[in-house]
Structures are given as C-alpha cells and as structure tokens.
C-alpha cells in the first residue's frame, strides 16, 4: 500500500481578499503559510503569486522570487508553480515565472474550458478592492485557454527545456482523452501525475459517480503508468479527498480550492486543512509521503536543480 501524497495549494487565483482574511496575499504571508503547510504534512506546495498591494493574481517573476527561496530554505517540500496563473493572463504571462524558476513541478490544465466564477460575484456587496467584483463577473463570458498548441509549447519549454514534470489538471473526462493524445505524440513521459478536479462551474460536477468514472477512464488510458490525486472545490473538498484516499489516490487541499475547514467555518490557514486531511488519512490506516518519497514516486529532478 503506497503512501499518500498531500499537495497543498496555498493561494491560487480564484478567491479574492474579500472572501477571507486568512487568504495569503503578500510574499511573506504566502511563504509563512506554505512553510507551515509543509510542516503539517504537505509534500507538494502548489504556488501562485499575488500583487501585495491589492491581492490580485500576478504573473510577475519578481514577486515569486520574494517567496520561493524562503520556502526552499525552510522546507524540503516539492515546489509546484502554476502555469495557469490568473484568469486574465496571457499564456506568455503565465509562463514567465515557471521559466525563470525551473521548478521540479508545474500545474498544467489539459484543455480549454469555461472557467466560470461569476456566481461568486453575486455573493458579496462590500468589496475590499475595486478589481474583485469585475474579475469574477467577467468569467460569465470567458474561456480559459489551453489549446493543444499551448500544451505542446509548455511541454517543450518546461518539460524538455528544464526537466519539469507536470501536475496534469483534468477538469473533465475529455481532459483525460487530451492527455492520452499528448502521450501518443511523446510530449510527456510516464508515469504521469493526474489531478482530477471536481466542482468548478464549467468542469465536471462534484458527484462521486464522476470520480469513479474519471478513475476508470484513467485506468483504461494509462494502465499502471500514472499516479493520481483529487481536489474538489468548496464544501466538497474533504469528502472527495477522503474518498480518493480510500481508493488509493493522493489528495490536494488548500485555500486555493476551499476557504473552509467545516460547514460555515473559514479555515484560518492552509496548515489547518493539511492537518485535517492528514488526520483523516492516518485514521484510515494510510501513511503520508515525505517530500523525498513524493520525488521518488513521481520521478522528479530534485530540489537542487531549480533556479531559486
């Protein structure tokens, strides 16, 4: 029985400062929460950056470099940098920080999609910053771009160019077909690491039948040449992660995916969510993977070969 890898997505580009005072915004807050999440048991830290002045997602490599070295110095966790960035960014902007940092891992969405956050724009009346409401509302007419051409380019620049491996984010069953197509063309080397994502409007719904269907489809395409993890948005987070653990999968938590620790109760930190899923996993009789065990399982290049 293999050990379970916990990924923690620290801040993301979905939630905005109005939604929670605990969402890390500044480089210091991102570094502090990432380090605490690693100490709580996260083997992989998935990282976005935010403009420290108002909390909006930023692709600026200089902001990333304010927290990446600090995290590396304080923890052995695997650093996984987004190639998704924020919903208003071009592909070039989304790649700026990963290309500078050359991390062990990057996230990679396996298709274009209607990434719809506009219902969140209706939930709040008082906003901390003027950018927040339009940022969310505009996703009603927004397509998050990741064409096959984009995917090939990202693979060649980061995979071939820097030895980076990918967290293949699959928001629907079609994304698994897309990944199989890419593997047929030699763009990625197995074993691949799948992140099966549920509950984002525009992607597959948070229904446990969908989890089983996604897992069966992955088995059909990739056999034993893959590892998999699950994240679910909002209130579905812990239930889906628990189900994934019972099926032998890995798990992802973090304030990027859910701001809550229980019904109606905001999580006070990323580490609080990591500690909760670790407790659940261990009470189920499983062990969690260390960063070195995660590196060995996923075939990563090692933290000594990054540029930060």
Image (spheres, helix red, strand yellow):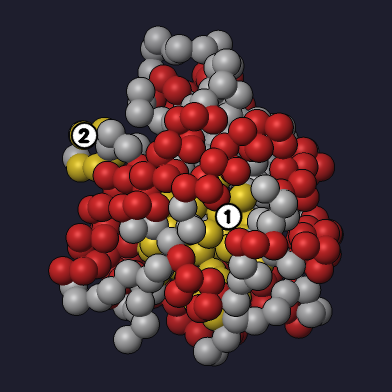
Residue denoted by label 1: 80
- The quadrant of the image that shows the N terminus is bottom left
Q: Residue at x 50, y 85 (%)?
A: 219
Q: Residue at x 54, y 30 (%)?
A: 27
Residue 70, above or below 282 = above
Q: Residue at x 35, y 28 (%)?
A: 22
User: In the structure shown, which secondary structural element does the residue marked by tag 2 occupy?
Assistant: strand
Residue denoted by label 2: 265
User: In the structure shown, which secondary structural element does the residue marked by tag 1 occupy?
Assistant: strand
Quadrant in the rendering for residue 137: top right
* Residue 50 showing in the rendered view: yes
Residue 38, above or below 133 = below
| Left or right of 195, for residue 177 | right
Q: Residue at x 61, y 33 (%)?
A: 66
Q: Nearer the viewer, mark 2 or mark 1?
A: 1
| Left or right of 152, for residue 297 | left
């Amino acid at each position: 029985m293999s050990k379970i890898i916990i990924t923690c997505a620290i801040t993301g580009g979905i939630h905005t400062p109005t939604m929670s005072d605990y969402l890390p915004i500044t480089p210091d807050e991102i570094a502090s929460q990432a380090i605490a999440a690693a100490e709580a048991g996260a083997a992989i830290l998935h990282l976005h950056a935010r403009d420290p002045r108002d909390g909006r997602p930023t692709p600026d490599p200089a902001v990333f470099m304010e927290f990446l070295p600090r995290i590396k110095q304080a923890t052995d966790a695997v650093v996984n940098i987004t190639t998704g960035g924020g919903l208003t960014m071009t592909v070039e902007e989304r790649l700026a920080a990963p290309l500078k940092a050359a991390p062990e891992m990057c996230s990679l969405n396996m298709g274009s999609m209607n990434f719809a956050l506009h219902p969140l724009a209706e939930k709040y009346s008082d906003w901390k910053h003027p950018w927040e409401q339009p940022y969310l509302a505009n996703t009603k007419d927004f397509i998050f771009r990741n064409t096959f051409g984009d995917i090939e380019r990202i693979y060649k620049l980061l995979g071939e160019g820097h030895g980076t491996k990918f967290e293949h984010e699959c928001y629907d069953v079609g994304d698994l077909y897309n990944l199989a197509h890419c593997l047929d063309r030699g763009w990625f080397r197995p074993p691949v690491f799948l992140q099966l994502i549920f509950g984002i409007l525009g992607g597959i719904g948070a229904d446990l039948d969908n989890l089983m269907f996604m897992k069966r489809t992955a088995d059909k395409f990739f056999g034993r040449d893959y590892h998999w993890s699950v994240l679910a948005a909002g209130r579905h987070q812990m239930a889906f992660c628990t189900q994934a653990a019972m099926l032998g999968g890995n798990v992802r938590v973090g304030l990027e995916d859910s701001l809550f620790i229980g019904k109606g109760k905001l999580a006070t930190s990323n580490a609080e969510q990591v500690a909760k899923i670790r407790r659940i996993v261990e009470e189920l009789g499983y062990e969690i993977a260390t960063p070195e065990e995660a590196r060995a399982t996923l075939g990563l290049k090692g933290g000594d070969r990054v540029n930060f």
